[in-house]
Amino acid sequence: MTQEAKSILHNSLAGTWYPASRTILESEIEGYLNHVPESDPTDVCALILPHAGYRYSGQTAAYGVKQVAGKDYSRVIVMGPSHRVQMKNKVSVPRAAYYETPLGLAALDVEFIERLAECEAVIHHPSVHEVEHSVQIEVPFLQTVLRETPLVPIVVGQFDEAATERMAEILLRLIDDRTLIVASSDFTHYGASFGYLPFHSDIEENIRMLDLGAYTMIEEKDCRGFMKYCDETGATICGRDAIGILLSMLGPESEAHRLSYQTSGNLTGEWDHSVSYLSVAFTGNWSLPG
């Protein structure tokens, strides 16, 4: 391990996106998890989770993470979009050994990250990992339900179709059948502040139809159809490229399961500015080579 890889990634979200107090954060996460009905799926290979502040999307995220609580995974790859930095057809991985959150240090799979970093499409962009919330927001939940499982944070740039397929192939060569992958994404961002106002009436229902249209493509594991849907509707799904990579990795027998759907508009009553949250679990296997 290099000297750089022994460092700690400090979170930038505590006290704003979720509580800075360990006790309060633990209590909040446990509260979300306790509201999810008990189930015991045995073969969850992937999740799509939202990445807003916990008071908005925490309950929706809990529906996903509870499906993997206490399971035996070799690692968790967390792929989230780069909201601030342009990285055309590239992903960024950190040079660190731990993530720090109010819950303590979460170990990273340094060996896997170093192997991944040998690939041309993989770069190290330090500022991305310091400020990007899409990956950081998932860490406390994963620390809670998979305490000893190392993480692989991947911040995903802006991908075209060919690069999406190449990135999926790269990951499939490196993972094993005990790897869990989390694609971090919110769904429709509606409102003038997002530059997205495709309709002005029946807003709640139209947003729902837009989101569920995207989910239909996800359920069919149709990466190309999902990307086309986003392009044709303008659907502001920030993690579309992370989801696209995930869809391109799924085996033919895998299945999608929609667990929870919510919008900030429904939570606040403010439909002129709404973000959608979806929690999805995939059961089955990866399309591993050989």
Image (spheres, rainbow, N blue to C red):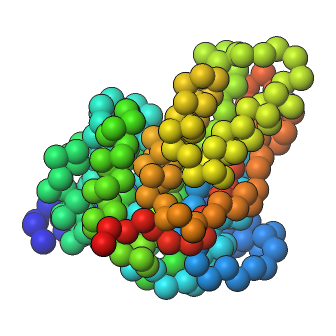
Q: Nearer the viewer, residue 263 or 72?
A: 72
| Residue 266 falls in image quadrant | top right
| Residue 34 falls in image quadrant | bottom right
Task: Say whether residue 151 is visible.
Answer: no
Residue at 44 percent of width and 34 percent of height: 83
Q: Is residue 44 above or below residue 202?
A: below
Which x, y percent locates residue 290? 30, 72
| Residue 258 falls in image quadrant | bottom right
Residue situated furthest left in the rendering: 2
Q: Is residue 276 above or below residue 106?
A: above
Is the N terminus in the top left, top right, bottom left or bottom right quadrant? bottom left
Which x, y percent locates residue 61? 66, 58
> Would residue 155 be found to the left or right of residue 22 on screen?
left
Q: Nearer the viewer, residue 21 or 215?
A: 215
Residue at 39 percent of width and 79 percent of height: 74
Residue at 37 percent of width and 33 percent of height: 160
Numbered disc total: 0
Q: Nearer the viewer, residue 213 or 189?
A: 213
> Would residue 223 be found to the left or right of residue 53 on screen?
left
> Would residue 257 be found to the left or right of residue 102 on screen?
right
> Would residue 227 be found to the left or right of residue 5 on screen?
right
Residue at 49 percent of width and 85 percent of height: 72
Q: Is residue 3 above or below residue 271?
A: below
Q: Is residue 146 above or below residue 206?
A: below
Which x, y percent locates residue 223? 51, 44
Which x, y percent locates residue 104? 44, 72
Task: Say whether residue 210 is visible.
Answer: yes
Residue situated furthest right in the rendering: 202
